[in-house]
Image (spheres, rainbow, N blue to C red):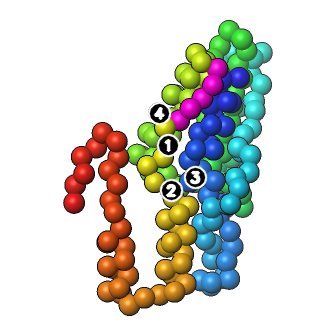
Amino acid sequence: LHVEEALHAVWAMHETLGLRFTRTDKGGLGAHAALITPEKGPVPLTRLELSSLPDEECWPIVEAEAQRLAAEIIQGTGALMGFVLCERGPQSPPWLLAVCHPALMDESSWRILATDLADTCEQARTRGRVRLAPQSGALAQWVQELITEVHHPRLVSQARVHWISRPILPLPGWPLTT
């Protein structure tokens, strides 16, 4: 299935999709911290077989699954993003529902995800293989550097110099502003 292949490629490419909340002893009772797992688990994907139903009967089923998944995500006990693949038979394209914790993605991130999914679906459908352009930065590396800084605090002025001196890499096709 092209959608599933595309979803796996996008999941593997975007580090932030693997973020999870974990409980931490620091910060008081019930404190949570975001964690990037060293190796991503499988794509949190639920399948709904809807091919025997007309579209108008599918929507309540899809909506109920979206609410169930959203409640699970908000609890912060697993992945902060999940997907529902609604298979509608050979004559109708599948639907893909993405549900995400509000802390994980903003409007720009949704556009990037939607564009990458559309591009990879088209690649899988027409070429049979999927290739995404490399990411412009490594989130895991940045997070690790930030964690190191937190555990070895510097004077505020030294920290400011350290983080401001980091090179700014422009996104392809975007002007560099300072």
Looking at the image, the residue that sits furthest to the bottom is 155
Residue 134, numbered label: 1
Q: CA distance from mark 2 to mark 3?
A: 8 Å
SS for callout 4? helix
**How far from the left and from the top, in percent, is residue 42?**
74, 46
Q: Residue at x 49, y 65 (%)?
A: 142
Q: Which residue is mark 4?
A: 115
Q: CA distance from mark 2 to mark 1?
A: 10 Å
> As rendered, which of 138 and 83 lies closer to the eye?
138
For the N terminus, the image quarter is: top right
Q: Considering only order in the chain, which callout, 3 or 1, is on the residue closer to the N terminus?
A: 3
Tell me which segment is drawn in magenta: 128-132
Q: Amino acid at mark 4?
A: Thr
Q: Amino acid at mark 2?
A: Ala
Q: Residues within 10 Å of mark 4 (few under 14, many from 20)?
A: few
Q: Is residue 144 visible?
A: yes
Residue 138, numbered label: 2
SS for callout 3? helix
SS for callout 1? loop
Q: Residue at x 59, y 83 (%)?
A: 27
> As rendered, which of 55 and 14 lies closer to the eye?
14
Query: Against 13, is 159 above or below?
Result: below
